Image: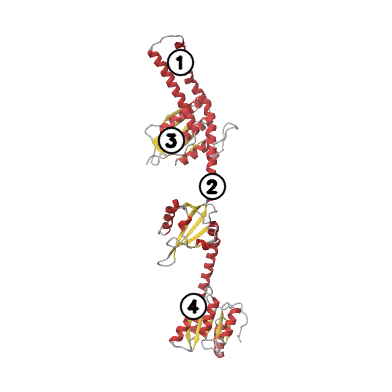
Amino acid sequence: MPDTPSRNKEKTITILVVDDDRKMTFVLSEFLKTAQFNVITCHCGGDALNIIEKIAVDLVLLDIIMPDIDGFAVAKKMKSFFGTDDFVPIIILTGLSGIDEKIAGLEYADDFISKPFSHKELLARIHVLLRIRSLQRELVVSRSQYRFLYENAPSMYVSIDEDRIVRNCNAKFSEKNGTAKTAIIGKNITSFFLAPDHAALAKFIQSLRSPSPAAGSPVLNFVPLNPSFQPLSVSLSGVQRGENDTAHYSEIILQDMTHTLKLQQEQRDARKHLYLSARLASIGTLASGVAHELNNPLTAILGFSNALLNRLGEGGVFDRDEFVNYLTIVNSETLRCRDIIENLSKFARETETQIISFALSGCVVGALKLITPKASNKKITIAADVPPSIVVKADPHKIEQAIIHVITNCIDFCNEGCAVTIAAESGIHGVKLTITDNGPGIAADMISKVFDPFFTTKKTGQGAGLGLALSHHIMEECNGVIDIASEPGKGTTITLEIPSPA
């Protein structure tokens, strides 16, 4: 029967000694206890197998020659019982020293020591195998943690080999496909993406194998295996994992971006509507000044057309030069009205951003056609000095809108008799268009807020606070920058930094 020692909390390592020689088990037991091990002894293979089923042991010292089952068979059954995840070292201690016995013993055991042996050597081998056991247990824990994290990760994880065949995937990947893992493993990863995305997917996978993977995470269209499931927009990231010199696996993480992208699109659409509303609101403000601007050419058109009609109605005769002069005036004044209306409609129109090279002076001239009447009503002068030679690369329509909003903001805050100056200069990184007024300026604690939507210091009903916010948005669309500098009592300068052609 086995000899089980009393429990000692300080002794954490338990060694099972199996030998039919009771004197040998006693000597080994006393020696191992001296080395601070817990020791269990028994004298036959059957008892040894019963013990490991009931008591957790850390190492086994096993004889070969025993009355019931030989040590080789016992070692084989023990290894089967412990399994691959629990490495319990087995050292065979035997008087048999032939090469055949050693080979047979090492087939199932982890070490082989022939009797008689040195206790110091035995202790050294025990410590080596216990260190291996400790490392193996750490490895098992790490692998278990990895499997748990892999399987339960909130994102989709998929493992592919160098031929892009899926070798493993986690529960989230299976869930998003609407099918079991067994139906996924063995398929090519490209079958989960739309055909137009295959080139981008191949480039991404290739980048994982590069010593310096490409920055950024491509967003592709993921198509689940289950046809009843909706396609997803997923962001890809991953790492390359080398199993050996010939096998390489890629771990790919797929982050579902569908909801995020939808929200971003909704926000973009909301901003578009917001800024369109801002432009339409500005149209109302500009229209009052433009109405006065239209009255002059319309008066001329009406007057000269009436004069022509009266002459024709009375059967009068006038010379050809006078007739041509009247019609020329009517024609030019009509074109003037057309230009004013066209500028208004262009200002209100929503278009996609189109980056081209153009002369900046054209935008300034177009903006002044709409702004000048408003400035004149308030007796504010505008002086512009933008040479036609200065060329920028942006969307001319949107840049003109930004200029209108900035100048409008200057006019709204300036007192009667103030002045606004517009100047431009080319620099290393682009063109700086400065719009400066000599108005009341802005307090320091307000500067950081002027580009925020709906921020305004105007009285209720005089403005929604969207003009400068819209200008900021436009400059972002055109790859430019807008900045402001101001000091109370000393006016304000707003700078539009617009890219130059390469």
From the image, state whether disc 3 or disc 4 is nearer to you: 3
Mark 1 vs mark 4, CA separation in Å: 113 Å
Sort mark 4 into few (<14), some (14-19) or many (20+) by Cα contacts within 10 Å.
Answer: few
Q: Where is residue 41 in the image (x, y as percent from the top left)?
A: 58, 85
Residue type, numbered disc 4? Val
From the image, state whether disc 3 or disc 1 is nearer to you: 1
Residue 289 drawn above or below residue 265: above
Q: Earlier along the polypeptide chain: callout 3 or callout 2?
A: 2
Mark 3 vs mark 2, CA separation in Å: 30 Å
Q: Mark 2 points at which residue?
A: 262
Q: Mark 3 points at which residue?
A: 396
Mark 3 vs mark 1, CA separation in Å: 36 Å
Secondary structure state at the residue bearing disc 3: helix
Do labels 3 and 1 touch, CB within 8 Å? no
Quadrant of image for the N terminus? bottom right
Front-most of residues 307 and 464: 307
Q: Mark 1 points at which residue?
A: 304
From the image, state whether disc 4 or disc 2 is nearer to you: 2
From the image, state whether disc 3 or disc 2 is nearer to you: 2
Residue lying at 44% horizontally and 19% vertically, measured from the top left: 330
Mark 2 vs mark 1, CA separation in Å: 59 Å
From the image, state whether disc 1 or disc 4 is nearer to you: 1
Residue type, numbered disc 3? Pro
Secondary structure state at the residue bearing disc 2: helix
Sort mark 1 into few (<14), some (14-19) or many (20+) by Cα contacts within 10 Å.
Answer: some
| In the image: residue 427, left or right of residue 456 | left
Give the label on residue 128, or none: 4
